[in-house]
Amino acid sequence: MKLIRFGETGREEPGVLLNDGTRLDVSAFGSDYDEAFFANGGLSRLHIWLAQNGSSAPRVPDSARLGPPICRPSKIVCIGLNFRDHAEESGMEIPKEPVIFFKATSSLVGPNDPLVIPRNATKVDWEVELAVVMEKKATYVSRENALDYVAGFALHNDYSERAFQLERGGQWVKGKSADSFAPLGPFVVTKDEIGDFNHLSMWLKVNGQFRQRGSTSKMIFDIPALVAYVTEFMTLLSGDIISTGTPPGVGLGMKPPQYLKAGDVVELGIEGLGESRQEVVNFE
């Protein structure tokens, strides 16, 4: 099952994307894709509801904006330097344990919403990543049982302002949390539909030129290991996101470094998780 949300910013309604490309409005189901939905068996209940009501559910027009495919979660946990080549291009040591940082949940936007360059920004960068969406509350879970707590996966662009992140002191969160810095989607695909999530190709283009090409097989720490590791330090709630790191090819690692400016277009995708596109604009 592929979950979407559509409509005006802040007023999105829940929907599903069928395998033939049809988009259904499932707002009559009575629940948005929030913490309560995932925690209370929403995926199973929605599957049953669709079997009974899907044929009569309204269709979502192609012109409708897609919002982030889940409601704003309690937290967005990110994993840094989880691809060996990316750590090397960033000039950083290969981590012995996963590097954890946060993005503010207010940075979450739809997959095709504009990327807004924040005030005083000079080094805005891109990062195609696979995001994990949690289904069950998770504390101290084992690697062996970690996937039992996962609802599904989504495409994420972990935008960064490198000067804020690396040159302004303190934690990375400062360079990761501007409005529009977390476009998610176009959909969340449930784990039963994704196949082998350890071997998904991933890519990103800037102005039509490939900048990143990689595979989830190149992760230093795989998804079950990351879920288990994060729950050593915090409880993950239903609907929470773990963004699992990016392959090489970011602007910071280019020689000389290259960063985004207004008018640029960023396109990205992950096998089985769809594609997204962000036009870059200045903050007004």
Image: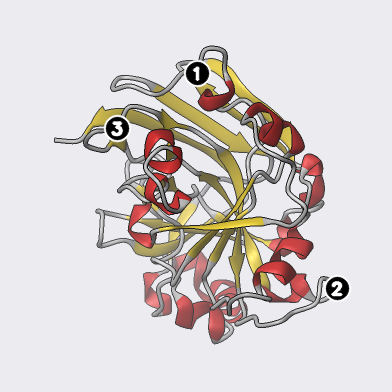
* Quarter occupied by residue 125: top left
Q: Which badge, 3 or 2, is on the more N-terminal residue? A: 3
Q: Horizontal placement of 97 versus 123: left or right? A: right
What residue is pinned by disc 3?
121
Q: In the rendering, at what x and y percent does residue 235 appear?
A: 58, 80
Distance from the alpha carbon under mark 3 to that under mark 1: 15 Å
Residue type, label 2:
Glu
**Residue at the image point whose x is 71% and y is 40% from the top:** 93
Label 3 element class: loop
Q: Is residue 252 above or below residue 18?
A: above
Closer to the eye: label 2 or 1: 1
* Relative vertical location of residue 263 with respect to residue 220 in this rendering, above or below: above
Q: In which quarter of the image is the N terminus?
A: bottom right
Q: Pick the residue in front: 250 or 237.
A: 250
Question: What residue sits 36% from the left and 53% below the top?
Answer: 107
| Image quadrant occupied by the C terminus | top left
> Marks 2/1: CA distance?
40 Å
87 versus 131 height, above or below: above
Label 2 secondary element:
loop
Q: Which of 76 and 87 is in front in this view?
A: 87
Q: In this view, does 37 lie to the left or right of 58?
A: right
Instruction: Name the residue rendered at 52%, 67% in the picture.
Output: 54
Please state the horizontal and vertical placement of residue 34, each as a whole percent of the image.
Answer: 44, 74
| Residue at image location 39% in from the left, 80% down from the top | 30
Q: Mark 2 points at which residue?
A: 144
Of mark 3 and mark 1, the one earlier in the sequence is 3
The amino acid pointed to by label 3 is Ala
Mark 3 touching mark 1, by CB under 8 A?
Answer: no
Q: How many other residues sit within 10 Å of disc 1, few (<14), some (14-19) or many (≥20)?
A: few
Q: Report crowding for label 2: few under 14, some 14 to 19, many 20 or more residues within 10 A (C-alpha).
A: few
